[in-house]
Amino acid sequence: MGNKSSKGYDVELKHCPPNPIKKHVCIIGGGSSALILMKELLSLGHTVECFERLPRIGGVYVKSYQNTILTTSSLMTAWSDFSDGQEKDPKFWTAEEYLVYLEAFAKKYDLYKYINFLHDVRTVRKCNISGKWIVTVKGGYGCKDIERCEDVPADPDAPCVTKTFDAVCVCAGTHNYSSLPNFPGQERFKGELVHSEHYHKPEDYAGKRVLIIGGGESGSDITNEISKFAAKTAVVIRGLHGHIIPRIQGNGRVTDLNTNRCRYSNPFIFGDAIGYVNQIAKKFVANFLDDKDLKNVLKKISDLNMHQKTSAFSKTGCKNEGFVTAMVTRGTELHRDSFELFENKVVFADGSEFECDAIVACTGFRNVFPFFDEYHPEIAYAGMNPRTHFKQSIYIEYPTEVAFFGFARPAFGSVPPTVEMQSRLFSLVLNGELELPSKETMRYIASEDQKNWETRFGYDAKRVKGLVDFQLYCDGIAKTIGVFPPLSKLFLEKPHLWWKIMFGPFTMHQYRLVGPYADPKRAEEVYNRQPLGDFLESAITASFLVTAKVLSFLGFERFTPNDF
């Protein structure tokens, strides 16, 4: 049934004829996860009804701060069956541009007619008699002070409606309930303290002394843009920052062209060495740039990464260089200590101080599912930790009826493509085309996967419950549903395509070449347009990969590459 390895537990499911009986599915949330899931379910003949509290699709990108830019490029964010046609010239979409992509996707697949906007799901319960899921929904939710929505007044008189479904899919996202700790001395602080959820634009902090708590991707971007207006800024990071990768390289190309199969086919044991050698190479190349600020920013990134001895193999990523740019070009202070707040300042454990008028806490969000609380608190509790699900998506107690989408968080790579793979898996299960193993086996697989991610990412995996390696996670689902690309065959018969898959950006088109509902013609057309990663970085990672292959051939199993 499965194969345990150092990269997790691979399992290929039994394929069966499609079930002629189709299901009616409730989808909670109207962001990107809901859209790709609806498309997959509808394509197999199932019916869906989606409930979204906002007046438009897009989820977190409707609500996020004014200058939001995605941290993965258009190539890495797009789905395999919907292209913007610009693969030759990938870019980092703004929130507005990504919403345009999502809206075009929804129109192409005629999804709008299935979405109930301004609707709040109140309760979900399983009927003990019929086995159906009873969902209570209230319309007239209302919308106020949302960044990319016009205000819509709530309708308190809107009735609650009860509907019946065969399955419930949670696509509510990870950014609905902010996590704001109570900081030591917070009661004394006289300035403004807000969670990043309530941050809108940097001009609000003009002339102020601002402390940003947290150096994740939002914290990094917010630090950078506030530093352009504030009198002074500082950022405090708990322990190690994420492994920093700038959006754009010194040559102007998007950096995640190098998030490719060649790099992540290397064994974990080589990961930090690959990271270190690449940082040395990048620092050397930066010396030849004409732009002095960019040169210093890229060199500082290499210094910070090498100082904490992290790599993309073992550390969650910070896929933008914002706080480093703020440090190098505008004198932002970096602190790594615990701290205590006073009336108008913060005092760090090393004795240093920073006088501040405002604090922006980029301290993340909690996974909370209040619609399960009344009747199924066990599902709400399980949802808080995606590791308990089969492939971090399918709820094991009701594996053909309840699933969560978008809660696996790749350290590098993008969430929407992982949701595409989750959606393909669940849709085939619901359609009767894949036979899941027993609940006991699924629990074992989930446990083994959890051990793997916690070994790989250490503390980060316990802090970010859904943290995964992008390639290994997607490959695992691909093997489960039978769509893993035939790399050896491609190497012999279509070497150009093999080269693109190995040294180009890691996109989901490779999983459309074979298996259920493949579209190899379209996948190859997109690959023909995609650029390759950088030569130097590809050469470094390829040399490690060939070395690993030789060592594994000689019997050193620890060096066995991942599917190479």
Image: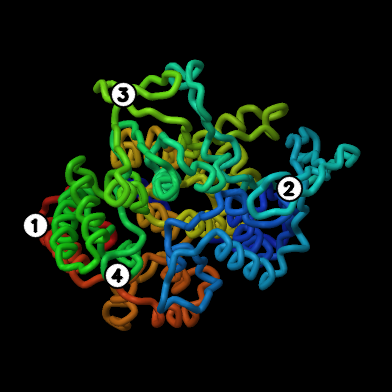
What distance separates the C-alpha of mark 1 from that of mark 2?
A: 53 Å
* Colouring convention used in this rendered image of the protein: rainbow
Q: Which residue is mark 1?
A: 554
Q: Which residue is mark 2?
A: 166
Q: Which residue is mark 3?
A: 348
Q: Which residue is found at the position 8% from the left and 57% from the top?
A: 554
Label disc, if present, on residue 393 of the rendered structure: none
Front residue of this view, candidates 273 and 6: 273
First in sequence, mark 1 or 4: give its number: 4
Q: Amino acid at mark 1?
A: Leu
What distance separates the C-alpha of mark 2 from that of mark 3?
A: 54 Å
Does the CB distance between marks 1 and 4 fall below 8 Å?
no
Dot 4 falls on a residue whose secondary structure is helix
Q: Which residue is found at the position 42% from the left and 59% from the top?
A: 72
First in sequence, mark 3 or 4: give its number: 3
Q: Amino acid at mark 3?
A: Phe
